[in-house]
Amino acid sequence: MKDIIDEIIDFRDKRGWKTGDKPENLAKSIIIEAAELLENYQWGQEFADLENVKEEIADVLIYSIAFAYDQGFDIEEIIREKLKKNSIKYPVKK
């Protein structure tokens, strides 16, 4: 995980984009990219462009990783914490 985080942050910083990456802007960007992902399914799954789906998922993840990094969050830790909460909220049904 560290390698991809470093690659994302290095890519951003080399282009001088860090100054625009305020929490509000990153949150907006995540939503915008998620909407672009959803657009693939607007008229049904059979119309989805899978190459575009992959690109939009990547955009959502890149912005999300940058957001977490800038906030000082340990991505693996916050995911595990959320999975733990979800396992309590949504227990396995027998």
Image (cartoon, grey):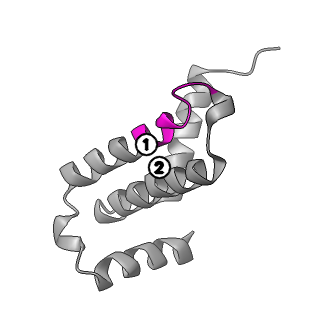
User: Which kind of residue does numbered mark 1 sit on?
Assistant: Glu
Quarter holding residue 72: bottom left
Disc 2 crowd rating (10 Å Cα; few below 14, some 14-19, many 20+) is few
Residue closest to the eye, 2 or 4: 4
State the image coordinates of residue 53 (x, y, percent, origin top left).
58, 47
Q: At x 19% / y 49%, what residue is drawn? A: 24
Q: Earlier in the sequence, mark 2 or mark 1?
A: 1
Left or right of 77 in this view: 30: left
| Above/below status of 76 relative to 10 | above
State the image coordinates of residue 38 (x, y, percent, origin top left).
49, 35
| Above/below status of 80 relative to 40 | below
Confirm or deny contact between disc 2 and disc 1 (CB under 8 A). no
Q: What stretch is highlighted in magenta?
A: 35-44
Whether residue 77 appears in this view of the structure is: no
For disc 2, the marked residue is 78
Q: In which quarter of the image is the C terminus?
A: top right
Whether residue 89 appears in this view of the structure is: yes
* Residue at the right extreme, as displayed: 94
* Residue at the bottom extreme, as displayed: 14
Q: Quadrant of the N terminus?
A: bottom right
Question: What is the distance, in whole Å, between disc 2 and disc 1 at their CAs?
Answer: 25 Å
Q: At x 58% / y 38%, what residue is drawn? A: 83
State the image coordinates of residue 2 (x, y, percent, origin top left).
53, 74
Residue 58 in the magenta stretch? The answer is no
Left or right of 94 in this view: 32: left
Q: Is mark 2 on a helix, strand or loop?
A: helix
Q: At x 36% / y 64%, what residue is drawn? A: 69
User: Which kind of residue does numbered mark 2 sit on?
Assistant: Ile
Which of the two marks, 2 or 1, is nearer to us in this view?
1
For disc 1, the marked residue is 36
State the image coordinates of residue 9 (x, y, percent, origin top left).
38, 75
Residue closest to the eye, 8 or 36: 36
